[in-house]
Amino acid sequence: MNIDAQLVKSLRDKTGAGMMDCKKALLESKGDLEVAVDHLRKAGITKAEKKGSRETKEGLVYSYIHAGSRLGVLLELNCETDFVANTTGFTELAHNLSMQIAATNPLSLDSESLDQKIVSREKEIFKEQALSEGKPQNIIEKMIEGRIQKFFQESCLLEQTYIKDPDKKIKDLITEAIATLGENISINRYIRYAIGEE
């Protein structure tokens, strides 16, 4: 099958994947652009793990303003090259992450960067709850651990369930983007603004 160079370019622009990878994916998918994108994503997930340690010094600052202009997010999303930073796929990821931040207002990026005072306070609250429920001491520690993990899933961006797909966490969304775009991607920082909030 002969693959049109314009189709290869379209796939490359959409995904940021290499020319040969795009051509191979289009051959595998018999020229279907959407199937080729899925093929690149599946093939790249395993490669994504290896890319996780590479430096991310390029990227973009993305701004999202929610309808009504009462809520906004500024997000710095990083990648390895300006080529990937300018792809549609990278911008879409920035948009989806910004929507997630706007909707869920995470306390931190991950559990490691969460203020330990907050973690200690939550553990103390969970302990008091367990004691007031009359649970035995050997069960209390397990309950606290389970509840603190749930707290991390609600409060830490990378651990949160993706609002558009409850089967995915945000860290899975980023891993998929790494696989598709072929570069390491990291969230450097973000801030959420809402009218009337401090």
Image: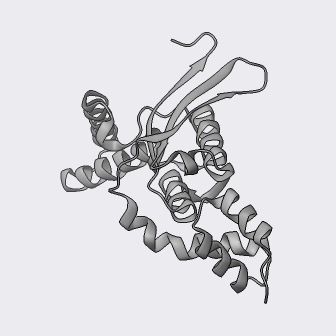
Q: Residue at coordinates 40% horizontally, 44% vertically from top-left?
A: 152
Q: How many marks?
A: 0
Task: Name the spot of residue 144 as percent of width and height, x first.
Answer: 29, 47
The quarter of the picture where residue 24 lies is: bottom right
- Identify whether 46 is placed above or below 13: below
| Residue nearest the observer in this picture, 67 or 20 | 20
Residue 84 in the image, given as x and y percentages of width and height: 56, 51
State the residue lying farthest toward the bottom: 1
The residue positioned 35% from the left and 49% from the top of the image is 55
Between residues 184 and 164, which one lies in front from this camera angle? 184
What residue is drawn where x is 49% and y is 34%?
A: 106
Does 31 appear above or below 135?
Answer: below
Picture quarter with the N terminus: bottom right
Picture coordinates of residue 95 (x, y %)?
65, 40
Relative to 167, does residue 101 appear above or below in the rendering?
A: above
Q: Along the horizontal axis of the image, is 178 left or right of 6?
A: left
Residue at 34%, 38% (x, y): give it: 129
> In the current view of this chain or complex, which residue is farthest to the left?
137
Image height check: is 22 above or below 1? Answer: above
Query: Horizontal and vertical percent for residue 18?
Result: 57, 67
Instruction: Determine whether, in the image, residue 27 is placed left or right of residue 118.
Output: right
The residue nearer to you, when weighing 144 against 157, is 157
Which quadrant would residue 25 be assigned to in this image?
bottom right
